[in-house]
Image (spheres, rainbow, N blue to C red):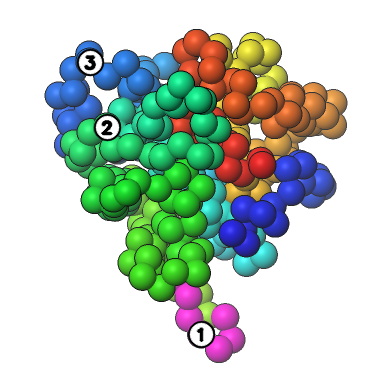
Amino acid sequence: MSTLTQRSSGLVQRRTEASRSAAAADRDRGSGDEDYEPRRGDEQDDDDSCDSKETRLTLMEEVLLLGLKDREGYTSFWNDCISSGLRGCMLIELALRGRLQLEACGMRRKSLLARKVICKSDAPTGDVLLDEALKHIKDTQPPETVQSWIELLSGETWNPLKLHYQLRNVRERLAKNLVEKGVLTTEKQNFLLFDMTTHPLTNNNIKQRLIKKVQESVLDKWVNDPHRMDKRILALIFLAHSSDVLENAFAPLLDDQYDLAMKRVRQLLDLEPEGESMKNNTNELLWAVVAAFTK
């Protein structure tokens, strides 16, 4: 797979509602979902208390927002990592919502990347992209691995019979979601030979809170143990790095803060997913996605 195999595992160098129906579906699942991890927006903390549910973002929206140029309203033309990164976001989001899990490892323990993705529940999430990905995974027999699903949902497959799995116009659809949530707006820009729809930032408070959340997770709120970190922020750090947008969250930091943040991110990137997935209070599919991007 071109994008995954070409991505360096090192850090880049410094460059000086969810909807009510989704919440209802999740509540209906009850307490039986041991692997269910509430979305960060479902936790009423001080930063989010003034926001309506419509401004709570999915992992895909957070990664896209980190990569979006505020004024220009589009991601870097040179970023060829974000497409597969967003598909990784979808798999982890569905896992944290209790929809997906990895197959049992069996007596002869399989590696994370050899185990298949299983649909645990097909209850709608209320997010069109997530539900589309969930339907593909549910309807596919035999099941596929995490790495295969990242390839298939990205359209990075050599098998023409599997091209229908590709989720198209993902960045544009996510941007429109953020427009509906009041985070972005829509404009038309002329690029000499063609016009392009762009989505400049209109609510800077939400993006600044997102950036602050990422910064604090490796600075003031650092716990030196990934299993004590909120699973959503842990996933966001890994996926933002895999999508080559994590740098954007750290660029405003002072030099000493930047160096410390990068050092701690490096500690996370150096973790061994296989070993971490066997510890308590973990989500195996999250670590399988991490393994797919860092192998």
Task: Give the alpha-carbon distance from disc 1 to disc 2, as whole Å.
Answer: 44 Å
Task: Give the percent coordinates (x, y) of residue 230.
Answer: 50, 19
Q: Which residue is mark 1?
A: 194
Q: Earlier in the sequence, mark 2 or mark 3?
A: 3
Answer whether labels 1 and 2 touch (C-beta < 8 Å).
Answer: no
Q: Secondary structure at mark 3?
A: helix
Q: Looking at the image, is 197 positioned above or below residue 273?
A: below
Answer whether labels 3 and 1 touch (C-beta < 8 Å).
Answer: no
Q: In which quadrant of the rendered image does the N terminus lie?
A: bottom right
* Amino acid bearing label 1: Phe
Q: In which quadrant of the rendered image does the C terminus lie?
A: top right
Q: Secondary structure at mark 2?
A: loop
* Amino acid bearing label 3: Gly
Q: Which residues are magenta?
A: 191-198
Identify the mark at residue 120; answer none if there is no mark: 2
Q: Secondary structure at mark 1?
A: strand
Give the residue at x 50% y 10%: 280
Give the residue at x 29% y 52%: 140
Give the residue at x 33% y 67%: 164
Asked where in the image residue 292 lies, by quadrant, the reply is: top right
